[in-house]
Amino acid sequence: MGGIASKGQLRMSFLRWAVVTVPLILLLGFLSGRSVSVGSENAWYMALAKPALNPPGWVFPVVWTTLYILIGLALAMILNARGARLRRLAVVLFVGQFLFNLAWTPMFFGAHKIGASVLVIVAMLVLSITATFVFARIRPAAAWLMVPYMVWISFAGVLAFSIGRLNPGAETLAPASHTSQML
């Protein structure tokens, strides 16, 4: 058997990747979010002064679930692009930014390191922008799926920075949390 795969075969290959990447990213994001108390379950966070642009608590799980689905689909498109010259670089950049993503929640909500969490967001944003440009060279649709994620993490960076400015010395407001919310 030789030759080029049919559109149906290519679609099935993408779907196989998506069935792995989307649930994996959702699971890892969920585990990171449950590794420490977050939002209204976190006494330290509830004691912080928050900027007027802080959304209600229910927004975060809805937005993150949606974004994780989108970036999981973007990654599946890149993984499905066998033979693409920049595929390996794109995956490495994606994994790098996603590792920063997973580290952010425990750093902010668990360790109470607001300044360090802003730096994590900056690194996440730089790597995701770079990954998105590389994605665009492989599959433009994959790059477009990354755009809402980059907008949201930019907003999260502004929010974290604002919380840090409104709460000097917030790291000492309560002891760092080392308890897991996972059952």
Image (cartoon, rainbow, N blue to C red):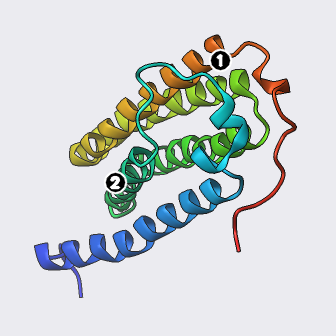
Give the total of numbered labels. 2
| Disc with the residue nearer the chain's start (2 vs 1) | 2
Label for residue 147? none
Left or right for 95, reference 108:
left
Secondary structure beneath disc 1?
helix
Picture coordinates of residue 10, whole percent (x, y): 21, 72
Nearer to me, 111 or 16: 111
Residue 134 in view: no
Label for residue 164? 1
Residue 34 in view: yes
Identified at 81% across, 27% down, the residue is 173
- Amino acid type assigned to the residue bearing label 2 in the image: Thr
Picture coordinates of residue 49, whole percent (x, y): 60, 22
Placement of 178 over or under 165, stated as above or below: below
Nearer to me, 127 or 39: 39
Foreground disc of the pair 2, 1: 1
Placement of 162 over or under 160, stated as above or below: above
Q: Residue furthest bottom?
A: 1
Placement of 64 over or under 123, stated as above or below: below
Label for residue 66? 2
Identified at 28% across, 74% down, the residue is 15
In which quadrant is the N terminus drawn?
bottom left
- Amino acid type assigned to the residue bearing label 1 in the image: Gly
Cα distance, mark 2 to mark 1?
27 Å
Picture coordinates of residue 35, whole percent (x, y): 70, 57
| Picture quadrant where residue 86 is located | top left
In which quadrant is the C terminus drawn?
bottom right
Identified at 62% across, 13% down, the residue is 166
Nearer to me, 154 or 20: 154
